[in-house]
Amino acid sequence: MVHDPSILHMVARGESGAMQACMDRFGGLVWSLARRVTRSTAEADDAVQEIFVDLWRSASRFDPSIANETTFVAMIARRRLIDRGRRRQRRPDAAALPDAAQPAAPALPDPAERREELGRATAAFEQLRPEQQRVLQLAIYHGRSHEEISRATGLPLGTVKTHARRGLIKLRQILEAEGALEQGLPRARD
């Protein structure tokens, strides 16, 4: 009996048309899983795209001795959908909040004041350890998630989270010592 080569192995090797074949074969499964846990069709579309990007990145980890392709795809989809649900829970829906609960936008300082604040923030940032600077740069300036930073830097996810947390705490300490932060700002958890 001749076995067809695994679509996921073909994706991992970067073969032409492999990703399209993967989407054709598993699109229905991924869509149905995404639609069950998302609030809208647009959100399901985003989730499906995210899942297939993750499958493309993870295809090399597929091992047919552990699970079949369908199980592997469903596992990746499930993990990604759980992550999306957790992110959604951490971010309250602004439409669900009463108008009175939404704070008024603070007045912007004048340009000279902003330059001075930027200078203090930059000087404080430069006092961080290089690995903390790198993680915070990727998060703040490039909008990367902890998981994306972990993949980009090769650091374990827990290490990325630790560098980010400790870097933010250190920045707050430096700026508070300089009197650059107002008293009413929330504190990072120690």
Image (cartoon, rainbow, N blue to C red):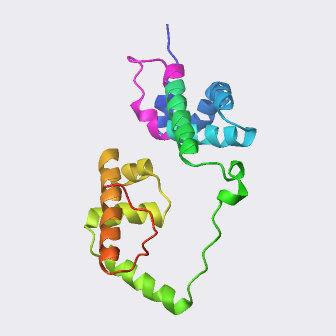
Q: Quadrant of the C terminus?
A: bottom left
Residue at 53% from the left image edge and 27% from the top image edge? 73
Q: Position of residue 169 (x, y in %)?
A: 32, 63
Is residue 156 at all visible to an observer of this figure?
no
Q: Is residue 64 placed above or below 183 in the rendered structure?
A: above
Q: Position of residue 166 (x, y in %)?
A: 30, 59
Residue at 42% from the left image edge and 51% from the top image edge? 146
Q: Is residue 107 covered in magenta?
A: no
Residue at 44% from the left image edge and 82% from the top image edge? 118
Q: Is residue 5 left or right of residue 36?
A: left
Q: Position of residue 133 (x, y in %)?
A: 33, 67
Q: Is residue 68 covered in magenta?
A: yes
Q: Which residues are magenta?
A: 56-72
Residue at 45% from the left image edge and 36% from the top image edge? 58
Q: Position of residue 48 (x, y in %)?
A: 63, 37
Which quadrant of the structure image shows residue 17?
Answer: top right
